[in-house]
Amino acid sequence: MSDSTADLVPHPSEFIREELEARGWTQRDLAFILGCNSTSLNLLLLGKKGISTDMAKALGEAFDVSAEFFSNLQRAYDLANASDPNPAIAKRARIQSQYPIREMIKRGWLHDAEASFLEEQLAKHFCVSKVSDVPYLDHAAKKTDYDEAPPAEQLAWLFRVKQIAKTLKVSKYSEENLRAALTKLKQLLIDPEEIRHAPRLLAECGVRLIFVEALPSSKIDGVTFWLDSNSPVIGMSLRLDRIDNFWFVLPHEIEHVLNKHGQQKEIIDVDMKCGTEEFVPTEENIANKAAAEFCLPQKDMDSFVARKDPFFSDRDLRGFAQIMKVHPGIVAGQLQHKTGDYRRFKAYQVKVRPFALSGAIFDGWGQVFPITL
């Protein structure tokens, strides 16, 4: 409560006493008019009792004014005499409006605490000395979808990947070995369970592969960045738990690494589809084309579409997948993208998250990767 504010707002009883004097009424007269107990009215006139809604209506009738007049007098007095709120409320409101605090606490990235300590934790999460220095995430691969993914959620996710990456030890990075690993990875396309080998194959090449569950409103699929000139990192959210999405996003990010994309600034990929896109940065088209070719040779895929369009049977899809030595779900994803019909062949897009996580470093899905801020 601010003393100066309280002094400026008198108790409503002052107005009642002034009206009694102006009308020549006594307290007993008013009690008679109101039909109430004189003792109860005395407590009101002494300022020891407030005006209830029923009393506001009664006083309005007695003095020929609106009931709202007395209700407003009481409301103004109560507000002026209320205790000042804890300053931490405004601070919590400010940081919650800017960052997904509650979700970060739920994930175990932050510890629930008073506002000042929360700000300290936020600053450490984003690797700055104070919250006001948190960088603004001003880029994403698909600009058309960027507005739909809150930048603060993208940023919080990105720095979680960075935190985990700094704790990991892998082999020395070798571009030659990474290119060779692509051949080994391609052999895993036929069986969803084989995905569990991907993190190990990349670690042997010096690439840190980390899975971090996406925050609720974010559509991030992956990120590529470098801890230093010899330490590439790939982060994936596994947001879309489908075999075709996994085997498009991972080679997409690998292509970024091979082209040394992300060394100056993180490359964040949002709401990716299994094909190439127009009106995206050159580096994204390079990675998109490489990823699509990794999944299926595009010459063969285009030939299959040209021969079968618009009638794609399950038998055709499975037969083509067998010839290409890939899981049918990968063909399904390519067909959906090329035809624009994402309702078809969903049954083939099997879930792969459990297999991916079984051999990986990950954070989320009920587990917290241990990090000391």
Image (spheres, rainbow, N blue to C red):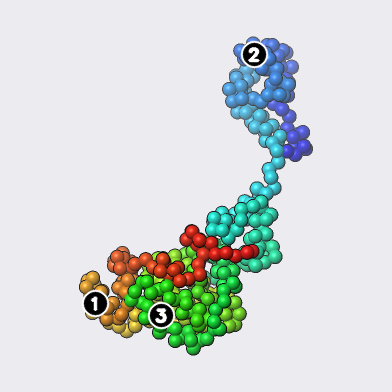
- Residue beneath label 2, please? 37
Disc nearer the start of the sequence (2/3)? 2
Above/below status of 231 relative to 365 = below
> Do residues under tags 1 and 3 come within 8 Å of each other at their CB atoms?
no
Amino acid type of the residue tagged 2 in the rendering: Asn
Task: Name the one closer to the observer, 364 or 92.
Answer: 364
Task: Name the one closer to the observer, 212 or 340.
Answer: 212
At x 77% / y 37%, what residue is drawn?
3
Image coordinates of residue 146 in percent, x first then y, are 50, 66
Amino acid type of the residue tagged 3 in the rendering: Leu
Image coordinates of residue 211 in percent, x first then y, are 49, 69
- Residue beneath label 1, please? 319
Pair 2/3: label in front? 3
Choose top left, top right, bottom left or bottom right for residue 160: bottom right
Q: Crowding near pointer 2: few (<14 within 10 Å), some, many (20+)?
A: few
Amino acid type of the residue tagged 1 in the rendering: Gly
Image coordinates of residue 311 in percent, x first then y, are 22, 72
At x 68% / y 11%, what residue is drawn?
29
Disc nearer the start of the sequence (1/3)? 3
Q: Which mark is residue 185?
A: 3
At x 69% / y 26%, what residue is drawn?
12
Label 1, secondary structure: give it. Answer: helix
Answer with left or right where residue 172 lies relative to residue 275.
Answer: right
Label 3, secondary structure: give it. Answer: helix
